[in-house]
Amino acid sequence: MSHNHTTIQQRPWSSTGILLFLGVLFLMIAAVLGGLWLNRSASATDSEDADRAVARAKNLAELQSADTTALTTYGWNDKAKGVVHLPITRAMELVLPSLQASEAKEQP
């Protein structure tokens, strides 16, 4: 009885395979570095960031002031239509009795 043994020979990396691997690696590194460089060049400078922060803070203060005024004062929203605004605390005082009455009607 004869036994056939198959010998598998391991082939060392061919020069083409090594060059292909290094080429792909180089392209990946170049792509990452290029993306980082483009992102750096598109970012705002420190002075631009500071100017934007000042503008945002000013806009926020104006918005909060307008909100406070609308929530704490009486005034006309549309005088021709008779639509007014009133302080939120007063509006709650006016609505609360009707809400309590409707809850009382719903309970058996």
Image (cartoon, rainbow, N blue to C red):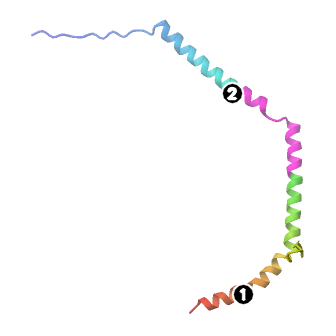
Splitting the image into 4 quarters, where does residue 41 fall? top right
The residue that mark 2 highlights is 35
Q: Which residue lies furthest to the top in this view?
A: 15
Residue 85: tell me if it is visible: no
What amino acid type should be assigned to the residue bearing mark 1? Ser
Q: How many numbered callouts?
A: 2
Q: How crowded is mark 2: few (under 14 residues within 10 Å), some or many (20 or more)?
A: few
What residue is rendered at 87% in x and 54% in y? 59
Q: Residue 50 in magenta?
A: yes
Q: Residue at x 33, y 9 (%)?
A: 9
> Residue 103 placed where, x, y %?
64, 87
Residue 42 x/y as whole percent: 78, 32
Frontmost residue, 80 versus 46 = 80
**In the rendered structure, which segment of residues is drawn in magenta?**
36-56
- Could you tell me which secondary element the residue under label 1 belongs to? helix
Q: Residue 98 carries which label?
A: 1
Q: Main secondary structure of the magenta part?
A: helix
Q: In percent of the image, x 12 and y 9: which residue is there?
A: 2
Whether the magenta-drawn stretch holds residue 43 is answered as yes
- Identify residue type, mark 2: Gly
